[in-house]
Image: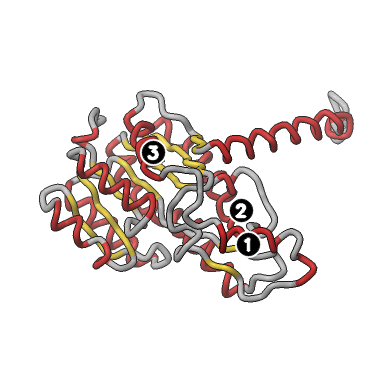
């Protein structure tokens, strides 16, 4: 049986110490919903359990720790008997040129943004499949829709989230489980503050491209146009919708960026269509 109201749903949210995750947990709890909130440092979210002792549970969870994921998933399901909404929110960015970042700097981005998301999702799939209901919400980014200099490794992690989520949606749809990918533009969270990383090495030849991204990191924190509270309200609206989207772009900057990419793509497809079609064997061969 599918739950019909927010008050009845059980939400499992990763990365709830700050940003979208924290605001989402607070909003759902304030509305009467039940939340299993997780963060690497459980003391940063312990106040949620104190404030909402009947409807909130908190767990320490590092999404790069597979054994901990399995343990927490089991405990989370036991806490309220089910999970209705899984929100894979944990993640962070890195500002770096492809040549500049070391493997020690960029691999943790993939371990958190991609492999952590995959492992957390897989931990709950048996329960969601058994229930024949549920909603998986994966936080991507406009960086998962269009690549930009200085964001290459972050782009790669989020592009992978897009492909994974689209395949997952097709697999889960016949089982009554929905999937939505959230693609925010710049929002006033800690993304450019303590949550972000800038590669230690910079190469002069990339100053005109990657240098602008590094400057953006240092200068734009707290100036982003996106309202995180409105983003949280949009996520809840998607979960409550009878016909939720697979993709939800959030913010004017993200929409403009993606429309620009689509326009350029259409131009390239038209210009090279004869080459594209010429790559096939003749009909009947």
Could you give the CA–CA distance between mark 1 and mark 2, rounded to whole angstroms?
A: 18 Å
Residue neighbourhood size for the residue with mark 3, other residues' Cα within 10 Å, grouped as few (<14), some (14–19), many (≥20)? some
- Identity of the residue drawn at 49% across and 38% down: 250
Residue 181 placement, left or right of 216: left
Residue neighbourhood size for the residue with mark 1, other residues' Cα within 10 Å, grouped as few (<14), some (14–19), many (≥20)? few
* Residue 280, percent from left and from top: 84, 33
Which residue lies under the disc numbered 2? 155
- Nearest to the observer: residue 156 or residue 151: 151
Instruction: First in sequence, mark 1 or 2: give its number.
Output: 2
Q: Could you say whether the residue bearing mark 2 is in a helix, strand or loop? A: helix
Q: Could you say whether the residue bearing mark 1 is in a helix, strand or loop? A: helix
Instruction: First in sequence, mark 3 or 2: give its number.
Output: 2
Tell me which corner region of the image, top left, top right, bottom left or bottom right, holds residue 62.
bottom left
Which residue lies under the disc numbered 3? 230
Q: Could you say whether the residue bearing mark 3 is in a helix, strand or loop? A: helix
Could you give the CA–CA distance between mark 3 and mark 2, rounded to whole angstroms?
A: 24 Å
Which residue lies under the disc numbered 1? 215
Q: Is residue 174 above or below residue 203?
A: above
- Nearest to the observer: residue 186 or residue 86: 186
């Amino acid at each position: 049986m599918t739950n019909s109201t927010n008050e009845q749903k059980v939400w499992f949210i990763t990365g709830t110490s700050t940003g979208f995750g924290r605001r989402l947990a607070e909003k759902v709890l304030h509305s009467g919903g039940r939340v299993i909130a997780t963060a690497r440092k459980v003391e940063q979210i312990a106040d949620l359990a104190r404030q909402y002792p009947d409807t909130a549970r908190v767990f320490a969870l590092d999404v790069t720790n597979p054994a901990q994921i399995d343990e927490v998933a089991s405990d989370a399901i036991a806490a309220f008997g089910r999970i209705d909404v899984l929100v894979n929110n944990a993640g962070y960015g890195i500002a770096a040129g492809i040549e500049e970042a070391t493997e020690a700097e960029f691999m943790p981005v993939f371990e958190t943004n991609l492999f952590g998301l995959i492992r957390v999702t897989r931990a709950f799939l048996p329960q969601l499949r058994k229930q024949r209901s549920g909603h998986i919400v994966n936080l991507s980014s406009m960086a998962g829709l269009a690549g930009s200099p200085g964001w290459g490794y972050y782009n790669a992690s989020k592009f992978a989230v897009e492909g994974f989520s689209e395949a997952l949606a097709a697999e889960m749809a016949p089982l009554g489980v929905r999937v939505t990918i959230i693609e925010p533009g710049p929002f006033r969270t800690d993304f450019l503050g303590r949550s972000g990383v800038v590669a230690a090495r910079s190469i002069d030849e990339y100053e005109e491209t990657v240098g602008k991204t590094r400057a953006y990191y240092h200068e734009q924190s707290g100036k982003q146009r996106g309202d995180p509270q409105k983003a949280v309200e949009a996520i809840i609206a998607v979960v409550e919708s009878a016909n939720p989207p697979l993709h939800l772009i959030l913010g004017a900057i993200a929409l403009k960026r993606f429309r620009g990419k689509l326009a350029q793509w259409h131009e390239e497809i038209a210009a090279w269509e004869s080459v594209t079609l010429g790559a096939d064997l003749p009909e009947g061969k």
